[in-house]
Image: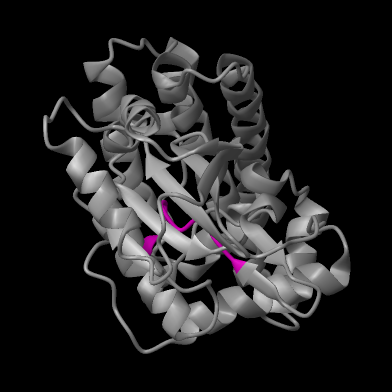
Amino acid sequence: MRKITLSLLISLYSLSFLRADPSILQHYEAVFSQLPNWNVDIAELQPFGNGCTNQNYLLNLGCDRYFVRIGSHSKEILGLTFAKEIELILMAATLGISPPILVADALHGIIIFPFIESKPVNLRNKEKLANAIELLKKFHACDKTLSFTATPENIFDLYLKQLEKLDIKLSEHQKLLIAKRPIPTLMTLVPCHLDLKGENLLDDGNRLWLIDWEYGGMSDPLFDLATLAPAAGFSENELNTALELYAPRPTEELKQRLKQFRILANLRIALWCLIMSRMSTLDHPYQQWADELFDEVDFQISELCSHCRKKAG
């Protein structure tokens, strides 16, 4: 672990999405100093996991520990902002779904939370999945509205524009799959998380907390549930299990809508992978993931069309 010094703050700045600003050190120091027990002489900071669009750190202040999240440039490319994320977290924390924010600076991309010691969460454990679905349902059911949307079509419009800006070429087959994507009628939009997976849940031994809210917004609740397919690697059967936990005895119409949103969720992450293959400094096989997801989308669209033909016949 390293003490927070001016040189360390500079290194944090170099990792962040911010542009050159001679006052940046003062901004960082001002953010950290908002912690009630801040003491630069005892502060120790260490990297904590690899985020795709953030740098995460564990901050030790004597016996107290904090989780520090600093944004990267790729957030902007993906249409993500700390202002949106903070709005989501404040809503979720009010409902007891997310850990509370202790300090936040949206302009300079820093959020500080209490550190929660957590065990890994396996969403293929039905009890853990049920607990996670309850958090999602609670968020969907709240009577509050976010100031921004994250519907599938909103996301596709943004990602396709960014692919063009980055000069990332889609194959003719990929273009065809995008054109053939289902466009289901949206239900009433509700606050959504849109990145449900075990890595975005904390298990403190007594309960689960849902974290990493940067992709959320007002959207269709089934789109939120469908993100379990690409994010957690859920199969169709596993996704149906999640649906039954979310809406006991779901109708055939609801199951078919979930299939449509599963295609959109997979397509969204395929496009995300293509953008990250150009923007990310992490050594992840983004291109391979994109290709695999487009193959999934191809199969799922064919399956959906076959079902529609049988129903029509």
Question: From the viewer's perspective, is residue 180 above or below residue 152?
Answer: above
In the image, residue 8 lies at what x, y percent?
40, 31
> Residue 230's quadrant in the figure?
top right
> Residue 16's quadrant in the figure?
top left
In the image, residue 132 lies at what x, y percent?
69, 71
Q: How many marks?
A: 0
Q: Is residue 251 visible?
A: no
Q: Is residue 122 visible?
A: yes
Which of the pair 226/212 is nearer the observer?
212
Residue lying farthest left? 22
In the image, residue 211 lies at what x, y percent?
55, 61
Magenta-drawn stretch, dominant element (helix, strand or loop): loop
Question: From the viewer's perspective, is residue 178 above or below residue 184?
Answer: above
Residue lying farthest front? 41
Q: Residue at x 80, y 69 (%)?
A: 128
Which residues, given as a range, are shown in magenta? 210-217
> Residue 233's quadrant in the figure?
top right
Q: Residue at x 52, y 30 (%)?
A: 270
* Horizontal side, residue 128 vs residue 66: left or right: right
In the image, residue 9 lies at what x, y percent?
34, 35
